[in-house]
Image (cartoon, helix red, strand yellow):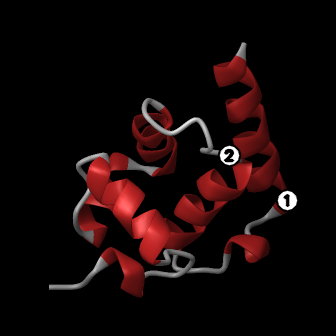
């Protein structure tokens, strides 16, 4: 079975946070989606941030988060702003 930490952008710390949110394997992260995974983590971790959300999206797309298209980063930034209101 593939581990979350084998995905792009997912280190041991983010893997631990995902597991605490009930996401145990890459398939579950892909099914949950980056936004919903972020929201689940954010319920107990106030340190969840845009960089984490971008890392999750990059992991799902199998690319470095820095390589996400500008429009995707912009959409994720707007998502975070809306959730903080």
Q: At which x and y percent is residue 36?
A: 43, 39
Image-based side of 33 in relation to 38, left or right: left
Q: Nearer the viewer, residue 6 or 70?
A: 6
Q: How many marks?
A: 2
* Above or below: residue 76 compared with residue 58: above
Instruction: Point out residue 58 in the picture as x, y percentages from the top left corner.
Output: 59, 69
Q: In x, y percent, where is residue 69? A: 78, 65
- x and y percent of residue 14 in the render? 47, 65
The answer to which quarter of the image holds residue 85 is top right
Extreme residue toward the top, this view: 85
Q: Identify the residue position indicated by label 2 in the image.
A: 49
User: Which type of secondary structure does the marked residue at label 1 adopt?
Assistant: helix
Q: Which residue is mark 1?
A: 70
Q: Please report the residue visible at 42 percent of the width from the left and 50 percent of the height from the top.
A: 33
Circle 2 packing at 10 Å, graded few (<14), some (14-19), many (20+), is: some
Question: What is the CA distance from the residue labelled 1 to the residue labelled 2?
Answer: 17 Å
Residue drawn at (57%, 76%), measured in percent from left and top?
9
Q: Is residue 21 left or right of residue 15?
A: left
> Which is more N-terminal, label 2 or label 1?
2
Along the line of sight, the residue nearer the viewer: 10 or 63: 10
């Amino acid at each position: 079975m593939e581990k979350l930490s084998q995905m792009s952008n997912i280190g041991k710390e983010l893997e631990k946070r995902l597991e605490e949110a009930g996401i145990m394997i890459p398939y579950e992260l892909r099914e949950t989606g980056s936004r919903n995974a972020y929201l689940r983590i954010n319920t107990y971790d106030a340190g969840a941030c845009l960089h984490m959300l971008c890392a999750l999206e990059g992991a799902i797309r199998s690319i470095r988060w820095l390589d996400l298209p500008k429009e995707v980063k912009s959409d994720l930034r707007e998502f975070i702003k809306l959730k903080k209101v």
